[in-house]
Amino acid sequence: MTRLIFLGAPGAGKGTQAKTLADLCEIPHISTGDILRNEVTQGTTLGIKAKSYQEGGELVPDHLILDMMRERLSQPDTKDGWILDGFPRNVTQAGFLDDLLKELEQKCDRVVNLDVPDEELVSRLLGRGRPDDTEEVIRRRLEVYREQTAPLIDYYRDRHQLVSIAGSRSMGEVTAAIQKAIDL
Ligand code: AMP
């Protein structure tokens, strides 16, 4: 049973590593960014509400995310574990997740923080070519990360759940370092 939260700045390789680890552990990779992009493409009510925030690099309002995650973490495939990628994104969401996990009688094992120097993030993001990866949006997403998401590093360090991994290495090396650190 593995339950992990992945933290990292945009461009740190969080999505790729979360997906790889989830495949290795045969558990769901739950990416709030992917879910939201899919809702936007499908033109659902949630997608219509989330679109402008996502396209501008802002966080989608908490209440929308919280409802979405309550629903996702209540699905039967989460019983054997999960990897959360992109959630929680601020301290309010982290508090909500604590309460939700208590309610679901689940416990997160570790929080994996991928550490990549700032100058590397922008070049990685520009090379990625996602529709919400224009230079202006990238700059804003990095700001939002620093202001709202980076405080989660201390939040989880204080709770002795944090594992920090140097992310400026090849994909395989980072995966191996994560596996070693979480003892899988
Ligand atoms: P990501 O794919 O994780 O980089 O997320 C892309 C975009 O989706 C973000 O810039 C936000 O607009 C939105 N998003 C993803 N996860 C969250 C979340 N937990 N809370 C609020 N907005 C989110």
Image (cartoon, rainbow, N blue to C red):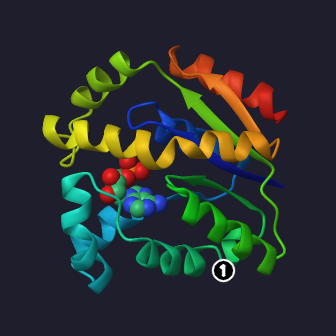
| Residue 181 drawn above or below residue 68 | above
Quadrant in the picture for residue 138 = top left
Residue in view at x 18 percent, y 66 percent: 52
Give percent across and percent down for residue 59.
35, 59
Q: Quadrant of the C terminus?
A: top right
| Residue 115 drawn above or below residue 142 | above
Name the element at disc 1: loop
Residue 46 visible? The answer is yes
| Residue 176 drawn above or below residue 110 | above
Give the residue number, with chain letter if any, for mark 1. 74
Q: Nearer the viewer, residue 28 or 118?
A: 118
Q: Nearer the viewer, residue 82 or 141?
A: 141
Residue in view at x 28 percent, y 25 percent: 122
Q: Is residue 131 left or right of residue 153?
A: left
Residue in view at x 33 percent, y 40 percent: 143
| Residue 139 drawn above or below residue 120 | below
Q: Is residue 126 left or right of residue 146?
A: left
Q: Quadrant of ligand 1?
A: bottom left
Give percent across and percent down for residue 103.
78, 80
Residue 32 visible? The answer is no
Quadrant in the picture for residue 104 = bottom right
- Name the outermost residue toward the top: 169
Q: How many marks?
A: 1
Q: Nearer the viewer, residue 165 or 43?
A: 165
Give percent across and percent down for residue 31.
49, 57
Give percent across and percent down for residue 127.
24, 26
CB at disc 1 and ligand 1 closer than 8 Å: no
Please tell me how crowded label 1 is: few (under 14), some (14-19), or many (20+) other residues with Cα within 10 Å. few
Q: Nearer the viewer, residue 180 or 59?
A: 59
Q: Amino acid at mark 1?
A: Ser
Q: Quadrant of the N terminus?
A: bottom right
